[in-house]
Image: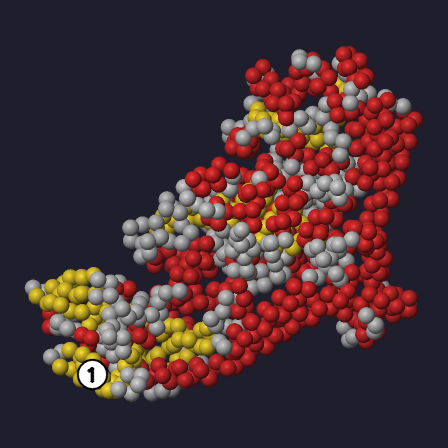
Amino acid sequence: MSVTDFIPGQRWISNTEPELGLGLVVSNADRRVTIQFPAAEEERTYATNNAPVSRVEYPVGDTIHTRHGQRVIITERIEKNSCLIYFGQDEEGNELIVPELDLESSVQFSRPQDRLFAGQVDKLSQFRLRIDTLNYHHEQQSADTYGLSGARVQLLPHQFYIAHDIANRYAPRVLLADEVGLGKTIEAGLVIHQQLITGRASRVLITVPDSLIYQWLVEMLRRFNLQFSIMDELRCTAMELSGTDNPFDSAQLVLCTQSMIANNPERVSQMLDCQWDMMIVDEAHHLIWNEEEPSKLYQAVEQLASNIPSLLLLTATPEQLGLESHFARLRLLDPDRYNSLDKFRDEQSQYETVNELVQQLLAEDGINNLATQPSLQAQLDDYLGKGASEKLLNEADQQAALELCINHLLDRHGTGRVLFRNTRDTVTGFPTRILVPHPLEMPAQLESAAADASIEDILRPEKLLGDFWLDEDPRVAWLDEWLKAHRLEKALLICSNADTAQALEEYIRLRKGVRSAVFHEKMTLINRDRAAAYFADDEDYAQVLVCSEIGSEGRNFQFAQHLIMFDLPLNPDLLEQRIGRLDRIGQKHDVQIHVPFYENSAQAVLLRWFDEGINAFRHTCPAGRELFQQFEDMITSLIMDGVDEDAFEELINASQKAAGDIMTRLQAGRDRLLEMSSCRPAKAEQLLESVELHEKRMQLRDFMERVFDQFGVDQQSDGAHSVILQPTDQMTEHRFPGLPDDGCKATYSREQALSREDIQFMSWENPMVTGSFEMIMGSDFGNTTVCTVKLPPLQPGTILVEAIFVLYCAAPKALNLQRFQNQATVRVVIDSNNNDLSQIITPDHLNKLGERVKRHVAQNMIRLGREQIAGVLQKAETEALKQQQPLIDQAVTKASSMLDEEVERLEALLEVNPSIREEEVAHLKAKRDQILTHLQDAQLRMDAIRIAVVRE
Ligand SMILES: Nc1ncnc2c1ncn2[C@@H]1O[C@H](COP(=O)(O)OP(=O)(O)OP(=O)(O)O)[C@@H](O)[C@H]1O
């Protein structure tokens, strides 16, 4: 630009700060030009030869706004003393004359055509990045597994099956009851993440036992990038003192302890005043209920559950406290469905018949069975409606029809809508459990002390040994020796009592020099987590963590291989919870379960019964609780009255038989159905394939490298898959989304992310990536560019206009309308002779052959070719618009067929399966109508323009 280009009174716009609005030249002297930006009340002075500004000239036909608020369509434009005067008509048809000085200053050019003609031309690389963003964004949004693939987790089929099934429901309310350590937290996290990222939920409340609060906090952050806020009494009070009305309104994602919910009605009432979308209750077997006296926790959760649309209850032992409590928890999920305990009991007995039918159909000759057995046909018709079997047998593809029927049976008459339970039998990869009993001689004084003691005291013999039990208890001496002999191995020790844990740990640490830590309910939460972290440390670690029973619930200690049961609990579910600390996903070794016990003692009775009677050490024993109830009297009498070998034999034989019977019954009925509806392997595999297919690491890496470059984030490669990212002073935005102020390390490899939890997992759902999508698509970044291109058949000087359109629907994010559109963009290429070359000149041609031009050259090209380009753009718009209706029709057809099928399925289910909530069907229908309306209103909108000038 030269000195003579700038005349006071002219309007210009800044290329680097377009948000300042329209500028006004106020002076031009000494090779410096000063431009005022009235809308922003700012002024800039530039050197005239390289001022980063573009002249604003509106063509005839455009609409302009005056500073007096008038809207004028330009009919004529003249230039006087190098300034423009516009002539035109306002909305009432009044003739107006508008000198450019009178133009409204707060205009923003974000439409690509406006920016182009205002001289705001982006780099070629930015244009390409924009188009790639549109395509990748659409691809991710359309994937069936959208929202499930960004977690730092191994792709385990049973978890993805459950998460996918639940996450696709409206306001899901379910009980996640996988066996201990199979990943219920992960399943819940996947569902939360998916609901948040798709916009179906935005406020989530998680409540967990006190000892698990930090573990959940960390797990949500490191695996799902979800930053929860812990709301404890201290924090709530501090916020109230500083003027916050309701502390629970201060965060979207809140974690709180179950003791707060159970014991603090005021806090519960504050929670009730907030609009939550989702609540998660971990270790939900604590929600104890009986008719006379429901627990406080149950009552508080019940209040919250009736106000919060979505509810996930997590427990590995749903029936730990009896069928009544289990039923009451199901009632929290769906009070209409679970309104009678007797009916519920009846239903349980029906599962056997349904399963028998399913098994006959699943058999190798299932079709044949059905074709030749009228009784089977009648049974199927009974369940699925008259004519169901005939229809199936008449299908061309009978096998596929049979599959569908089995799905319907499970769906409508099985257990699966509300309850999910995967077992170790169906999930592979678990270690072997080895029982290592350590018989010890009973201290003499115990025999007499035990005579009048209660069963609880007998089971914790240290209590009976008096104040010096640590010196006298042979288990303590055994422990000391064992730890010395296994110095390099970590062991988790569990005993039932906090005082025992505390005294024992102090003793071995101070008196025996063992590196140990303690974990019990009398410690503060912070100290508990410190102890757990010390035990987990790879280098400077505690060899043994001594826990009271609270350490047997929910915690992840699978890095240790040895579990020492200092005593044994009476309840087989608790035994399983203890073993589950080590026997969980991620355990790489066999689990050794050490039980030091006195011969001929109560513990010896329990040990033998658990092992020989119900085989609860080496395997999980789903029938444990029921068996314990059945044999409790016999066990108690053996414990209290001393061992009578014949009676013991009888107990063992009877227990084995009963265990076999119960397992057969469960397998024949409820458990088999549960298993089938908790994970259908073929579907689960398909889901994992979809996640892998959309992972596209190389493309993601390439994409993000370009984004970081463009936005000024420094990146240093750090090995094959990872990178170190640092904010810089050259960043174009104040902050880069998701990037910590002090930078971070990130990896594009799931495997590496799993082994290095200190580095970020860069998936398409990482906040840095989704933030980049939003930053680029939500702004004018890269929406105009100019290049030259050598394309021999075309005449030099020909102008090619490549216009990119997107189908735009102004709809809530939660509807995720992109998934119904087959393509992300519509692309039209028109040349200056108005030929449509869209099919001939591909994006690849222009990407590969297009050469960059300097900005001022590009601006000149636009200025000179403006009229022609405007005409071509109009033609491009006309051509694109021809595709609008077909695109809408295609999206509407796809949406209708998907959503109608879902509605029909739910309606059919509703007729026969009371676990469907009416509101679920109503919501789905309303959502379908809303989606179709929005799609029908969709409009193609020009999103970006590339001008290519053909050169010699
Ligand atoms: N897909 C996965 N990828 C990586 N780690 C996993 C995965 N699933 C589970 N884990 C790990 O396995 C352990 C058990 O998972 P989680 O805590 O979710 O199990 P749970 O079923 O809730 O256990 P509990 O019954 O003890 O409460 C945790 O350490 C978890 O991080």
Q: Is residue 396 above or below residue 194?
A: below
The answer, for residue 698, to whether it is visible in the render is yes
Q: Is residue 438 above or below residue 809?
A: above
**Left or right: where 899 falls relative to 733:** right
Residue located 39% across and 72% down the image: 943
Disc 1 element = strand
- Pointer 1: residues within 10 angstroms few (<14), some, or many (20+)? some
- Residue 358: percent from left, percent from top: 81, 60
State which quadrant residue 909 falls in. Answer: bottom right
The residue to which callout 1 is attached is 97
Q: Nearer the viewer, residue 26 or 346?
A: 346
**Left or right: where 170 falls relative to 427:** left
- Residue 339: percent from left, percent from top: 75, 54
State which quadrant residue 904 falls in. Answer: bottom right
Q: How is the image coloured?
A: secondary structure
**Left or right: where 569 falls relative to 381:** left
State which quadrant residue 40 falls in. Answer: bottom left
Q: Nearer the viewer, residue 794 or 419?
A: 419
Residue located 70% across and 55% down the image: 335
Quadrant of ligand 1: it is top right
**Left or right: where 760 falls relative to 338:** left
- Residue 311: percent from left, percent from top: 62, 52
Query: Which amino acid type is shown beneath numbered disc 1?
Result: Ile
Residue located 24% across and 87% down the image: 95
Quarter in which the N terminus is drawn: bottom left
Q: Nearer the viewer, residue 555 or 359?
A: 555
Q: Nearer the viewer, residue 64 or 762?
A: 64
